[in-house]
Amino acid sequence: MYEAFLKIPKRRIGVVIGKDGATKKTIEDELGAKLDINEDGEIVYSAKDPLNQMKLTEILKAIGRGFSPQEALILETDEYILHLIYLDLELNKNQKAQERYKSRIIGSEGATRKQIEASTDTKISVFGKTVGIIGLPKNVQIANEAILMLLDGMTHKAVYSYLEKKKINL
């Protein structure tokens, strides 16, 4: 077994562990893995199968970036991927501007995020300085493009129109 290391935000440790350790146990059982988690958010992990090791890395990253364990465990399926957009790199703007752009992606009461998710059959998490997308590669690409359009200042209407056109092709 090969050991790997990943650090996640402290406030996401409880999500990885779950109530009475249930989430941690589920992840370990389903992937034939071992997780050692400390209170600083450092996770040392290993899986018997190298493919499961890669999946485990993506699942832990997803949970660390704001996805629920149920959403992250979709990454066990070979067809699904996790894509992260780093807002600090993409925008090259100050914290206040990043917050404004995050609000554009989420929308009023989550409407924009929900619209992108529904149109592309993806799951989206806006957490910290990242936007995470889980889905099939083709769908993730479309959701990513829609989010980048919002970050480039396109109107929500233009983004929804783009999604409608792409939805026909899915």
Image (spheres, rainbow, N blue to C red):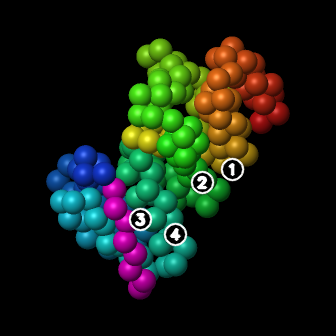
User: Mark 4 falls on what kind of element?
Assistant: helix
Residue 90 percent across, percent down from the top left: 58, 42
Examine the structure image and report whether residue 126 is included in the region drawn in magenta. no
Amino acid carrying label 1: it is: Pro
Q: Earlier in the sequence, mark 3 or mark 4?
A: 3
Which quadrant is the N terminus positioned in? Answer: bottom left
Residue drawn at (65%, 56%) of the image: 79
Say which residue label 4 marks: 54
Amino acid carrying label 2: it is: Ile
Per the rendering, the mark at residue 137 is: 1
> Could you tell me if the residues under marks 1 and 2 are in contact, i.e. CB atoms within 8 Å?
yes
Amino acid carrying label 4: it is: Met
Crowding at label 3, few (<14), some or many (≥20) Cα neighbours within 10 Å?
few
Per the rendering, the mark at residue 20 is: none
The residues tagged by marks 2 and 4 sit, at their Cα atoms, a distance apart of 11 Å
**What's the magenta region?**
1-8
The residues tagged by marks 1 and 4 sit, at their Cα atoms, a distance apart of 17 Å
Say which residue label 2 marks: 81
Q: Quadrant of residue 37?
A: bottom left
Q: Earlier in the sequence, mark 1 or mark 3?
A: 3
> Could you tell me if the residues under marks 1 and 3 are in contact, i.e. CB atoms within 8 Å?
no
User: Mark 3 falls on what kind of element?
Assistant: helix
Nearer to me, 85 or 168: 85
Crowding at label 1, few (<14), some or many (≥20) Cα neighbours within 10 Å?
some
Nearer to me, 125 or 79: 125
Q: Is residue 101 above or below residue 73?
A: above
Say which residue label 3 marks: 30
Q: Is residue 164 above or below residue 72?
A: above
Q: Earlier in the sequence, mark 1 or mark 4?
A: 4
